[in-house]
Image (tube, rainbow, N blue to C red):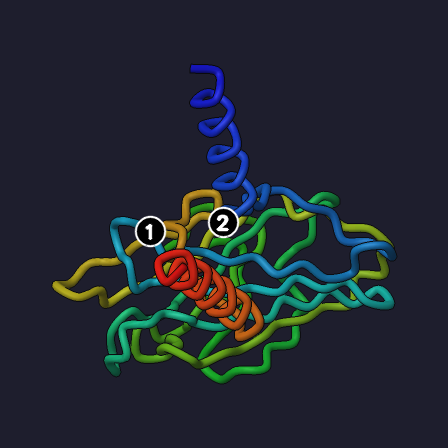
Amino acid sequence: MKLFRMLSLCTLVTLGAAMPALAASFTLDATTPSVTVNYGPTAACTTCSTSVTYTLNAGVFTVAFQNTSTDGVAGQNILTGVGFNTTPDIDASGWSVSIGNWSVVGNGGGVGSFEIVPNSDQGINGGLDGGQAGSVSKTIGLTSLTVDASLVHIQALLGGGSIKLDPCTDCTPPPPPPVVPEPATLLLLGSGLLAAGRSRFLRKTT
């Protein structure tokens, strides 16, 4: 019974280590100037996902986002908005936008009420399909900035509708990669089996 409990504990620890959880709130500063946050996939949409990298460098705050959805179908799972709140507060004016048909507003993009929302001006028509990316940036003159909460909006799901994705605390973890034995391990195993077989053969013949 004690052995079973120890094995169960080891299993839980291993699973916990294999499923990293990222807190919704994080701080950018000289020690951690850049943080990448993944959103999705979830059980509600197993092919929907977005990656957003928040960077504070020399007083410039940059938010780079990419639709990483894996549906592989043009016009499906379109990223149309990224919303976030910060401390200290930042307003929606004075941002540089790297992608056409996008702007930064105080709310919108289908993500709800956020201080900052980079979003598609033309909805799905101006949104980002799988693999497409964009960024926004603003000089804020700060050495430290906390992103308190964030959300992304993906539209044109299979069958219609849309979904809002939180940071990856709600993600469906990907399946673990298959364990492939190293060549040295296979050689050692093979040598051991040959030695065991030879020993058994010699015992039978003597």
* Residue 11 vs residue 104, the one in the foreground: 11
Which element type, helix, strand or loop, lies under badge 1?
A: loop
| Quarter of the figure with residue 161 | bottom left
Query: What label sits on residue 178 in the rendered view?
Result: none
* Residue 109 visible from this viewpoint: no
Which element type, helix, strand or loop, lies under badge 2?
A: loop
Q: Name the residue: 43% across, 72% down.
A: 67
Q: Name the residue: 48% across, 49% down.
A: 168
**First in sequence: mark 1 vs mark 2:** 1
Q: Name the residue: 37% across, 77% down.
A: 130
Q: Would you call the spot at circle 1 few (<14 residues within 10 Å), some (14-19), or many (20 or more)?
A: some
Q: Position of residue 149 (x, y in %)?
A: 56, 44
Q: Position of residue 201 (x, y in %)?
A: 38, 63
Residue 99 is left or right of residue 43, and the answer is right
* Residue 33 vs residue 109, the one in the foreground: 33
* Residue 48 vs residue 155, the one in the foreground: 48
Query: What label sits on residue 42 in the rendered view?
Result: 1
Residue 113 is left or right of residue 54, and the answer is left
Q: Would you call the spot at circle 2 few (<14 residues within 10 Å), some (14-19), or many (20 or more)?
A: many
Quarter holding the N terminus is top left
Task: Look at the picture and state if 144 lies above or below 52.
Answer: above
Residue 100 is left or right of residue 178, and the answer is right
Disc 1 residue type?
A: Thr
* Residue 69 visible from this viewpoint: yes
Disc 2 residue type?
A: Pro
Task: Look at the picture and state if 166 lies above or below 80.
Answer: above
Query: What label sits on residue 167 in the rendered view?
Result: 2
CA–CA distance between discs 1 and 2?
11 Å
